[in-house]
Image (spheres, rainbow, N blue to C red):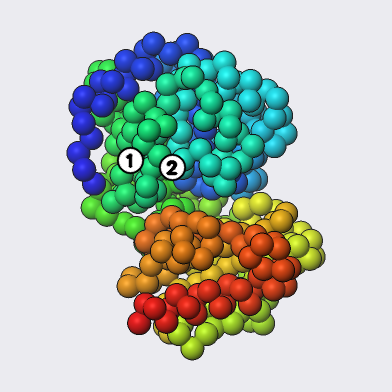
Amino acid sequence: MKDISRDDILKLHGMISRAERIVVTAHMRPDGDAAGSCTALLRYLLGTGKNVRVVLPDDCPDSLAFLTGEDYGRHFLSAEKAPGPAKEAIKDSDLIFCLDFNSFSGARCGDLADALALSSAEKVLIDHHLYPQREAFSLLFSETEISSTCELLFWVLTALASAEDRKPGLGTDILTPLLAGMTTDTNNFGNSVFPSTLRMASMALEAGVDRESILQHLYNEYGENRLRLLGKLLYSDMDISPDGVACMMIDKEMLRKFNIKEGDTEGFVNKPLEIGKVKMSCLLKEDDGYMRVSLRSKKGVSANRCAAEFFHGGGHELAAGGRIYIPDDAGSPAEAREYAVKCTQMFMTREK
């Protein structure tokens, strides 16, 4: 990763010092990286005595409750449950931190997109995705050669704590959600790992973060039906094309039958990549009016380019996502699978 500019850190320090009402926000359907970075920044700012709210488009999934802890009930607002207060908090803020998304699009910010875009508050972006909407932000910490937003925030907060002469720096209350978010975004150090990633992990462990506890919460506390659904998908519902694309689909009936909650299917898309001949994995999940598309690929195949060209999305080189709109792209959810197979085959043919 590039060195963080001291001038940017000093500018950030000044923005925080001037601010009276701060909002921290992240993308729709927050994952570990979003929830971890929001929680860590919230705790850092609360430690400076600031008035802070985390305002999200949706609730955090129950599987990440261990990250947010008691802060969730005290300092988090969800537009899903309280749209009025959530938008009012954004309107009343004078500084907004935007974490783990790169633009104020509806696909990223949901019902908060307009409120965020129209806000007159200063806006700080801390993100690791391609193509940030630079003109929309007062200050950017944007880095793609990094594992996660949590890792980037770790380095920003480490530099900020040093500039503020904050001792003893970052505590485990801040480092734990940061390490957890980085762990989820790297698939437990399985992808997007850089030298800086390992340095961050080492520093967090040296500070006393309990990594074993993080792994227990992240991977060993799901409900039984998550594993049963995964087994069904892998055994009877996974197709592998001759060019090495594995495709699985979860429709609403499957979600209902297995009583699947938001966050329960986290990591499913990675499983087919364990098969030697699979070069890219595609998971479809039915939502209202569209299918969510998750793509993961092995080195040499660009999941990001495939998502951008065929699924109205994007992301990282080996991990990306998008949507198949019903009926604009595919006539029905049932036809979305055929559409995804056709598009990925076209893409893989061009990749050869």
Q: Quadrant of residue 226?
A: bottom right
In the rendered view, does 92 fall on the left or right side of 299? right
For the point 72% across and 68% down, which residue is it? 331
In the rendered view, does 288 fall on the left or right side of 244? right
On the rendered image, what quadrant is the C terminus found in?
A: bottom left
Precedes in sequence: disc 2 or disc 1: 2
Secondary structure under badge 1? strand
For the point 56% across and 78% down, which residue is it? 342
Location of residue 32 in the rendering, given as x and y in whole percent from the top left corner: 51, 47
Kindly report the distance in space between the C-alpha atoms of the residues bearing marks 2 and 1: 9 Å
What amino acid does circle 1 point to? Ser
Q: Which residue is mark 1?
A: 142
Location of residue 189 in the rendering, given as x and y in whole percent from the top left corner: 37, 58
Which sits in the foreground, 80 or 121?
Answer: 121
Location of residue 258 in the rendering, given as x and y in whole percent from the top left corner: 76, 64
For the point 23% across and 46% down, which residue is it? 1
Query: What is the crowding at mark 1: few (fewer than 14 residues within 10 Å), some, or many (at least 20)?
Result: many
For the point 48% across and 78% down, which residue is it? 346
What amino acid does circle 2 point to? Asn
Q: Which residue is mark 2?
A: 102
Q: Quadrant of residue 113?
A: top right
Secondary structure under badge 2? loop
Which sits in the foreground, 87 or 335?
Answer: 335
Instruction: Answer whether residue 77 is visible to the viewer in this image.
Output: yes
Q: Residue furthest bottom?
A: 242
